[in-house]
C-alpha cells in the first residue's frame, strides 16, 4: 500500500508541476509507447544478460513481496521466542532426546503447530531444526555451531543481496537507455530537417521525453524498490540472528527464560517486545 501511495505522490507531483507550468501532457503521452519500448526493452534485455537465471528467478519472486507490508512484527517475534522457549524448556526438563521427533518432523510436532505463524515458515523451521539436530547429536560444541550459523547467515545475506544489486544495476542503466532513446529521436529529427519548425519542435520534444523517462524510472521507480528490498532482507537476517543467539545461549547453559531474553535483545527496537510482554505471552501459551 505504501509503495503505491509513494508512487502516486511522486508521479502526481512531477507531472502536476509540468502541467501547472503550462506543459502539454499530450506530447509525453504521444511519445510514451515508443520511448518505453526502447528504454524498457533495452534495459530488460541487458538485465537478462547481466544476471544468472537463479538471480532472475529470485528477482521475480521478490517483486510481489515489495507491495506487501513487513511480516516481521512484534507479534511474530513474540511467537518465535515463545516457540524457542517451549522447545528449550522441553529439552531441559526431559532431555535433548525428547525433542528428536519434533526436530525430525516439525510439521507433525505439537510444539511447532502451536505457533502457526513461524511454525509454517519453511526457512525459520529449517534453520531451527538443523541446529537443534546438531545439539541433539552432541558432536559439536557451541563455538563450532556458532561458526556454522555465521556462515549460513552470511550465505543467506549474499544470496538476498544479489537481487538488490541486480535492481541497483538496472536503475543505474535506465538513464543511459533514456539517452539512447533520445539520441534515436534526434537522429530521426535530423532526417526531417526540411519539415516546418512546428513539426521539428514536436519531434525534438518527443526525443527529450526519452531522457526524462529514463531518469524518472531509474530514480523514481526502480531504485526505491531496491532500497525497500534491502531493508526487508535486513529484517529476515535479524530473525535468523535472534534464533542463533537464543540457541547459543541455551548451549552455554543458560535457562530457557534467559536464553530467549538473549534473543529478544538482538531485535530491532521497533519490533522488540518488552520483557513483560514476552513473559506474559510465554506464560499464556503454556
Image (cartoon, helix red, strand yellow):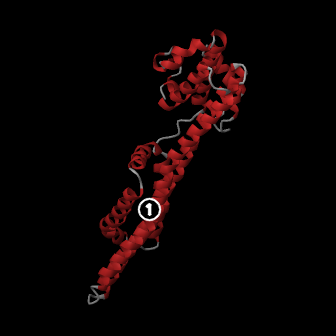
- The residue positioned farthest toward the top in the image shown: 94
Q: In the figure, residue 42 lies in which quadrant?
A: bottom left
Name the residue at 54% across, 46% down: 158
Nearest the viewer among 142 and 32 is 142
Along the viewing direction, whichever of 160 and 2 lies nearer the viewer: 160
Q: Residue at x 70, y 20 (%)?
A: 257
Q: Position of residue 51 (x, y in %)?
A: 42, 54
* Residue 271 % position (x, y): 63, 35
Which quadrant holds the C terminus? Answer: top right
Q: Please tell me which residue is depicted at 41% across the width and 58% down the height of the picture.
A: 50
Q: Is residue 267 above or below residue 166?
A: above
- Residue furthest toward the front? 139
Compared with 46, 63 (above or below) is above
Answer left or right for 12 relative to 198. right
**In the structure shown, which secondary structural element does the residue marked by tag 1 occupy?**
helix
Asked whether the viewer can see residue 68, the reply is: yes
Residue that badge 1 annotates:
217
Q: Position of residue 203 (x, y in %)?
A: 32, 79
Instruction: Using the image, determine if residue 206 lies above or below residue 9.
Output: below
Amino acid at each position: 500500500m505504501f509503495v503505491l501511495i509513494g508512487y502516486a505522490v511522486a508521479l502526481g507531483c512531477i507531472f502536476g508541476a509540468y502541467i501547472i507550468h503550462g506543459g502539454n501532457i499530450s506530447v509525453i503521452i504521444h511519445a510514451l509507447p515508443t520511448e518505453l519500448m526502447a528504454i524498457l526493452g533495452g534495459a530488460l534485455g541487458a538485465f537478462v544478460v547481466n544476471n544468472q537465471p537463479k538471480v532472475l528467478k529470485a528477482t521475480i519472486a521478490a517483486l510481489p513481496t515489495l507491495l506487501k507490508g513487513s511480516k516481521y512484527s512484534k507479534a511474530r517475534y513474540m511467537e518465535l521466542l515463545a516457540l524457542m522457549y517451549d522447545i528449550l524448556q522441553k529439552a531441559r526438563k526431559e532431555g535433548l532426546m525428547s525433542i528428536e521427533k519434533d526436530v525430525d518432523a516439525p510439521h507433525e510436532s505439537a510444539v511447532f503447530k502451536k505457533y502457526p505463524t513461524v511454525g509454517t515458515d519453511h526457512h525459520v523451521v529449517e534453520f531451527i531444526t538443523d541446529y537443534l539436530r546438531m545439539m541433539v547429536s552432541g558432536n559439536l560444541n557451541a563455538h563450532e555451531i556458532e561458526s556454522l550459523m555465521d556462515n549460513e547467515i552470511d550465505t543467506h545475506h549474499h544470496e538476498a543481496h544479489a537481487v538488490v544489486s541486480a535492481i541497483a544495476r538496472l536503475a543505474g542503466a535506465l538513464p543511459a537507455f533514456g539517452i539512447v532513446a533520445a539520441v534515436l529521436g534526434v537522429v530521426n529529427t535530423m532526417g526531417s530537417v526540411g519539415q516546418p519548425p512546428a513539426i521539428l519542435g514536436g519531434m525534438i520534444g518527443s526525443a527529450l521525453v526519452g531522457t526524462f523517462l529514463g531518469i524518472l524510472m531509474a530514480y523514481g521507480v526502480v531504485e526505491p524498490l531496491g532500497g525497500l528490498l534491502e531493508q526487508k532482507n535486513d529484517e529476515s537476517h535479524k530473525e535468523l540472528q535472534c534464533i542463533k543467539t537464543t540457541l547459543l545461549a541455551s548451549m552455554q547453559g543458560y535457562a530457557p527464560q534467559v536464553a530467549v531474553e538473549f534473543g529478544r535483545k538482538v531485535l530491532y527496537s521497533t519490533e522488540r517486545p518488552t520483557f513483560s510482554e514476552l513473559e506474559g505471552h510465554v506464560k499464556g501459551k503454556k
